Amino acid sequence: MTIFIFFNIQGNGILQHSNSKKIESKDYIEDYFADALNHLYTFEKDLQVISCSVNRERTLLAASLVQAAKDGRRNELQPGSKCLTLLVEIHPVNNVKVLKAVDSCIWVQFLYPHVESHPLPENHLLLISEEKYIEQFHVQVIQEDGNKVVIKNSGHLPRERVAEDFVWAQWDMSEQRLYYIDLKKSRSILKCIQFYSNEHFTVMFEAPLDISLSDSGFKLVNFGCDDLRDQEKLSKHLTLYVFTNRTGSLCVCYCPNIDSWERITYSVFYFHKGHSKTFTVALGSVDSRVTKGITFLNLDYYVAVYLPGHFFHLLNIQHPDLICHSLFLTGNNEVIDMLPHRPFQSLSGSLVLDGGSGKLYRVLLNQSYLLEFLRDTRLDCERMALLHCVLSCGRDPQRLEAKIIQWISENISACHSFDLIQEFLIASSYWSIYPETSNMDKLLPYSSLLTWNTEIPGITLVTEEIPLPLMKVHSFKGYWEKLNSNLEYAKYSKPHLHYNNGVVRREWHSLISEEKTGKRSSLVYVRNILDNAIKVISNLQAKTLEPRLTPLLQEEDNHQRLLMGLMVSELKDHLLRHLQGVEKKKIEQMVLDYISKLVGFAFSSLPPPPAPTHLPPNRRASAAEFAVFHIMTRILEATRSLFLPLPPGFHTLHTILGVHCLPLHNLLHYIDNGVLLLTETAVTRLMKDLDNTEKNEKLKFSIIVRLPPPRSSVMDKSSFSLEFLPLNYFIEILTDVESSNPALYAFEGHDNVDAKFVEEAALKHTTMLLGS
């Protein structure tokens, strides 16, 4: 007899377990529903159950049985022994019908169609034979005497062949799909059948597989629990799984028969991308008694490849092109030591069976441990992979990102192979809107890197193009629509669909050039762009931005506002062109959220204490202010190379901090090289806050002489008409500044004006104006 006992367990380390169940040998079959144990059926004799399945309404039980030897041990099929496949009425226990009585093993599986909760008049049962064929039985039921459920016309149950001449098959319970491989002229062909709520089923695709299965025998996956006690036998057999997820991915994971423990080779066929990767891991000196098999786990956006005690490979299946986006751990890594030293059998979705203990787990990535590992690791490739993996988990993103930002601010120069700020900017913005709609992986950049040429210690790989699956239907819904979209993208190779700021860069430079020459594009066009920027700022303020930083967002930094507004316009047009069937309002909001995430990082990454909006004069900067200045400088470098917008008040705050943190010669060097920008607000604040000591006058003079020349239209604003150009020009500057901020000239009427200073400043500006 057999019992199913269910309980919960929590795991530690990189994998987290939940909803665990344990399977033991007892005298009856029970099933678990709604947190309770329900007794379904009892076998009167001592029988060995090969396979069993209950229908959705729990009114029918199918079981495939073999008589056991007298000593109770499992009895291999002998000539004359019988495998009985039974169909039992269990609501209540009533008739038993023999479906098969053969000398080969039969596995059974009821279909669980995706329909409403009302009972179905017809059930569908798959029989999988060791003779390499699959049949579907159609079982109609009727109610008698109240709630009694019996089989209608049990003497004749309609049936049909679903597949034959296959060497491998896998059942996907959650999606009601059957994958199988048949051999055509010694070539392996992967096929998939989708079952529907009615009795119909459809072959969805065929895909050639470049693997050898001719001498591998017969193998089933997820049609019941294999006898996992003979680990040495299992470890030498090939391992093959098909994994999918809701984004339309289709992966085949394959490890051939293991004939050497010095190295291990496994392949992943990324059919949704049109290529495969074959990995080889050198295991080094391995004890010959080690006989554990490899395990593949489906973890949503990732597939884990796991050899107990030796290595753990977390493969990014959404973005597999660069090996640095996948995490590989081997050797004496403490993560390997924390993982169970026994193999798992991967079931549907993220369910796995621990064959050693008989426990069933739902496996998730442990976000907290991944974050801790990110803090501790020293390899750039591991930092890159862990950063993306943590962000993809998607649980409590605000708290998670706050911790990552804190780590980045403390380790801002830790990575040498890539810019940590750039990578976080791109990755966090991507994951902030990726789950909202499909195809975002094709339309938005995922990483700041385009190539990765550094080897990953302990592993080598070979990438090859593979034939795409041939879809056998022409109308798609749900997963199949997304898979078909991925295949079309891979077929026509459309890397140009990824958004980039090239158009924004050209248009922004054009607008700035027009501004300098006194020309201007259509006022309506510019106003629309600036209105886009206002929407981003409003969206950002509605988020969790700290109130102390709000005034900085209100600054009139038109250059940054133009850049922000242009990016809104271009990204919205880009998504509208390629996201079919998505509402315009939803796309507009996604664009605002995406750009708000990019812009908001510049302030959210600043440590809490400083980030001042006002710095008193004549005071040496604190260590915290030095730290903020350093972080802001690195943020500026990162965003400039990507041509990303910054908050309007960023340059003002950066310049004011620079004045207090840097010696004069360093400060002027930063200004001359464009690191610090002399915004109108920054200059006005400095002129107001700094007194007229000799040191500060020298600083003010150095800043004034570096102000950009005015536009030619400025000269028309003044009512003065002096023939001495230097003084005329300088009066214009002072008049403009005074009109914009009268508080600057509270000292008006006093005789403390340095005439020499005014003369030198005026001459310097005239020289710049005349271009000599």
Image (spheres, rainbow, N blue to C red):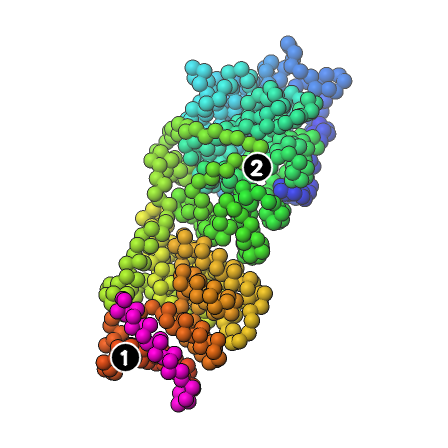
Given residues 71 and 765, the one toward you in this image is 765
Given residues 468 and 225, the one toward you in this image is 468
Q: Residues within 10 Å of mark 2 (few under 14, many from 20)?
A: many
- Residue in the picture at 55% in, 39% down: 327
Residue located beneath label 1 in the image: 728
Residue 115, x across and y down, in percent: 49, 40
Q: Is residue 176 on the magenta stretch?
A: no
Q: Is residue 750 on the magenta stretch?
A: yes
Residue reaching furthest to the right: 71
Q: Is residue 104 visible?
A: yes
Q: Circle 2 — which element?
A: strand
Given residues 41 and 707, the one toward you in this image is 707
Query: Mark 1 and mark 2: span between their CA atoms?
Result: 68 Å
Q: Circle 1 — which element?
A: helix
Residue 288, x across and y down, in percent: 68, 22
Above or below, 600 against 684 in this view is: above
- Residue in the picture at 29% in, 73% down: 766
Above or below, 711 against 305 in this view is: below
Which residues fall within the magenta stretch?
748-772
On-image quarter of the C terminus: bottom left
Label at residue 328: 2
Label at residue 232: none
